[in-house]
């Protein structure tokens, strides 16, 4: 019986992963989340309830309402369960909010992540997977983004904390032989999504006759990645710990692998679309036209994202496959049902 600990278990990706893991029935899952009020705690609780709805053996699931900044509580949980695998998804999310409230990002994304690394070291975790972000590519304009590209010019504090996580993880991997995989997520969307992200904001605006704010006058492209594809890739990484790259050349510094058991992998759909195309598909799925307002670029934002996922495909033999059309249909169906529009 394997024990897998998931932080951010009530989050968008976290709850979906918990549901996927519990389907295996030979895995015990420990969830951690502080259910904070960055957005609706009610949505987070309903996600978790949805994740465990069909769970027959309640002994396979334990949940703790605590923050990753609380090292004492973390240590008690790790001591009790001694998880084999840790999937670290807890973080203060949101690019724009990092401009308004930077201290929340310092505490959760840096102090909290440091606590997770320390627990993994102390309790000899066999595999750590953690959420990085496509935001680390910052001001890069060469597409598609590859793991070897420079990520030294973040344009938001959120991105800077994610780049810091990658560096912190490498040091622990090297010093303590801790297998670590960082996944750079690209614009995740789908049922049970975050209310502060574009799909939920746009759907709410369309159905309530509110204006959609379209930044950079619509000249934006995003590599939208459906939640099921994200979860399947994370699931597979759980059972393939990072390993030392024996071909690693210290003079060339390939940044996706290392002389330590360490991997960085892009996780996206590799099929970016214009933001206006996304809105058009959402309008059709919801059966209503949007009111659009065009605005300049926002601080901390980027014009385009596009993932090269060839390394991910080689590593876990999986390529994200849900088309944007199928994904938006599924999202719209869930949204209309959840909010009873």
Image (tube, rainbow, N blue to C red):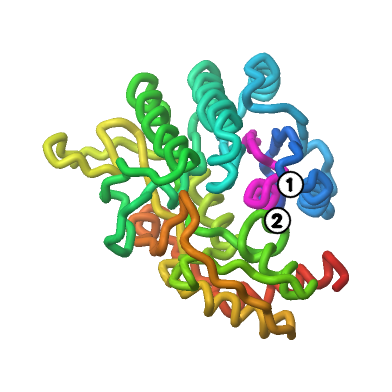
Determine if residue 84 is in view.
no
Q: Which mark is residue 195?
A: 2
Q: Residue at x 54, y 41 (%)?
A: 99
The correct choice, above or below, for 249 with respect to 145 in the image is above
Label 1 Cα neighbours within 10 Å, binned few <14 / some 14-19 / many ≥20: few
The correct choice, above or below, for 302 with respect to 253 in the image is below
Label 2: state its secondary structure: loop
Quarter of the image for residue 140 reads bottom left
Closer to the camera in the image, 184 or 124? 184
Tell me residue 190's x, y (percent): 65, 64
Q: Which residue is mark 1?
A: 39
Q: Residue at x 40, y 28 (%)?
A: 168
Q: Residue at x 48, y 64 (%)?
A: 296
Do tag 1 and tag 2 residues touch (Cβ < 8 Å)? yes
Tell me residue 98's x, y (percent): 55, 40
Quarter of the image for residue 104 reads top right
Label 2 Cα neighbours within 10 Å, binned few <14 / some 14-19 / many ≥20: some
Determine if residue 158 is in view.
yes
Quadrant showing the N terminus: top right
The correct choice, above or below, for 260 with respect to 12 in the image is above
Quarter of the image for residue 154 reads top left
Tell me residue 83's x, y (percent): 61, 29
Q: Residue at x 56, y 50 (%)?
A: 235
> What segment is highlighted magenta in the picture?
1-17
Q: Which mark is residue 295?
A: none
Q: How many marks?
A: 2
Q: Is residue 166 left or right of residue 250?
A: right
Quadrant showing the C terminus: bottom right
Tell me residue 237's x, y (percent): 48, 47
Q: Is residue 175 left or right of residue 99?
A: left
């Amino acid at each position: 019986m394997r024990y897998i600990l998931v932080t951010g278990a009530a989050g968008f990706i976290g709850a979906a992963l918990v549901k996927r893991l519990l389907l295996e029935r030979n895995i015990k899952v420990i969830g951690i989340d502080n259910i904070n009020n960055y957005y609706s705690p009610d949505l987070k609780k309903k996600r978790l309830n949805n994740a465990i709805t069909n769970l027959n053996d309640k002994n396979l699931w334990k949940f703790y309402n605590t923050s990753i900044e609380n090292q004492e509580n973390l240590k008690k949980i790790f001591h009790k369960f001694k998880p084999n695998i840790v999937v670290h998804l807890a973080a203060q999310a949101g690019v724009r909010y990092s401009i308004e409230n930077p201290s929340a990002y310092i505490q959760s994304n840096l102090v909290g992540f440091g606590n997770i690394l320390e627990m993994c070291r102390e309790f000899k975790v066999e595999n750590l997977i953690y959420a990085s972000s496509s935001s680390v590519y910052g001001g890069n304009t060469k597409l598609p983004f590859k793991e070897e590209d420079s990520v030294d010019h973040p344009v938001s504090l959120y991105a800077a904390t994610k780049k810091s996580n990658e560096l912190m993880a490498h040091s622990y991997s090297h010093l303590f032989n801790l297998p670590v995989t960082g996944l750079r997520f690209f614009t995740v969307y789908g049922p049970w999504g975050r209310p502060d992200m574009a799909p939920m904001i746009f759907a709410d605006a369309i159905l309530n006759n509110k204006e959609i704010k379209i930044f950079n006058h619509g000249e934006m492209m995003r590599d939208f990645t459906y939640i099921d594809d994200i979860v399947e890739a994370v699931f597979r990484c759980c059972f393939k710990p990072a390993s030392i790259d024996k071909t690693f050349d210290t003079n060339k510094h390939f940044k996706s692998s290392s002389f330590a058991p360490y991997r960085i992998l892009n996780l996206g759909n590799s099929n970016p679309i214009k933001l206006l195309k996304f809105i058009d598909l959402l309008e059709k799925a919801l059966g209503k036209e949007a009111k659009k307002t065009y605005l300049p670029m926002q601080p901390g934002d980027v014009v385009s994202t596009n993932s090269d996922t060839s390394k991910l495909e080689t590593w876990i033999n999986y390529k994200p496959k849900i088309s944007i059309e199928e994904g938006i249909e599924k999202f719209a169906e869930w949204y209309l049902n959840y909010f009873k529009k």
